[in-house]
Image: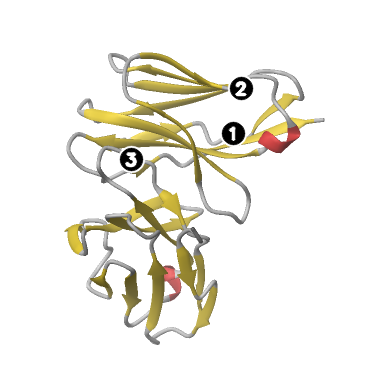
Amino acid sequence: QKEVEQNSGPLSVPEGAIASLNCTYSDRGSQSFFWYRQYSGKSPELIMSIYSNGDKEDGRFTAQLNKASQYVSLLIRDSQPSDSATYLCAVTPTGGFKTIFGAGTRLFVKA
Amino acid sequence: DAGVIQSPRHEVTEMGQEVTLRCKPISGHDYLFWYRQTMMRGLELLIYFNNNVPIDDSGMPEDRFSAKMPNASFSTLKIQPSEPRDSAVYFCASLTGGGADEQFFGPGTRLTVL
């Protein structure tokens, strides 16, 4: 079992719709959770971090964490073609920075 | 700030040659990370440093790989001898520490070993 699992996609949504990206992790001791966006040929950039159960909103982005279910999600509201990218879920255990990345979900937003 | 700087941006070499990748972290960042990204394995952490000291090198694939951080503003990742399966994009990232945990990635080095 992979430590951080994501559906590789591609996930295709029309412009203006909500895109929902999901991630599960295996280490129950994980404390920090991140979503990175990576455009083709570019480096990853952080878009959301979340540390406690519940929702965290930042503009059009909402991260959701459920530690009991070992589940993290990212919602993108009012999706734009510029949101088309690969989204990487990342998890860091307690007391360190050994970040584990998922394989990423490719998102296409159709104009 | 210029961000994380990596060189070279592209490297093409032949099997058996030594390859050295370079990274300059963001000034004031206490942590430096080396990652490798391939289609098959995704983004993998190879090693990370705190205040120039290697903290976790469990991701280094084998003895052919070595990393150093002689000072706070410079790190190298060396592959000797290189093999075709080392072909990947290698990213360096830095993090400030002190409670903040956003990693800032450099542009990456695309390595091709023929």
- The answer to which image quadrant residue B48 occupies is bottom left
Between B53 and B18, which is closer to the camera in this rendering? B53
x, y (%) of residue B99?
A: 26, 37
Q: Say whether residue B72 is left or right of residue B83.
A: left
Q: Nearer the viewer, residue A17 or B103?
A: B103
Task: Residue at the far right: name it.
Answer: A111
Looking at the image, residue B11 sits to the left or right of residue B79; the answer is right
Q: Which amino acid is tagged 1?
A: Gly
Residue B108, given in percent of the width and then of the height, sits at 50, 63
> Which residue is painted at 72% across and 31% down in the image?
A109
Amino acid on which disc 2 is placed: Arg
Number of residues whose C-alpha sits closer than 10 Å to that of mark 3, classed few (under 14), some (14–19) or many (20 or more): some
| Residue at image mark 1 | A9
- The residue positioned 26% from the left and 28% from the top of the image is A31
**Which mark is nearer the camera, 1 or 3?**
3
Res. B41 visible in picture: no
Mark 1 or mark 2, which has the lower sequence index? Answer: 1
Residue B52 appears in view:
yes
If the image is split into quadrants, where does the C terminus of chain A sit?
top right
The secondary structure type at the circle numbered 1 is loop
What secondary structure is found at the residue carrying circle 2? loop
Position above or below: B32 against A107: below
Q: Chain of mark 2?
A: A
Please give the residue where the numbered disc 2 appears in the rendered image.
A60
Is the Cβ of the residue at disc 1 closer than 8 Å to that at disc 2? Answer: no
Q: Cα distance, mark 1 to mark 3?
A: 28 Å
Mark number displayed over residue B101: 3
Q: Which mark is residue A99?
A: none
Please say if B31 is above or below A47.
below
Local packing at callout 2 (Cα closer than 10 Å; few below 14, some 14-19, many 20+) is few
Query: Could you tell me the amino acid type at mark 3?
Result: Asp
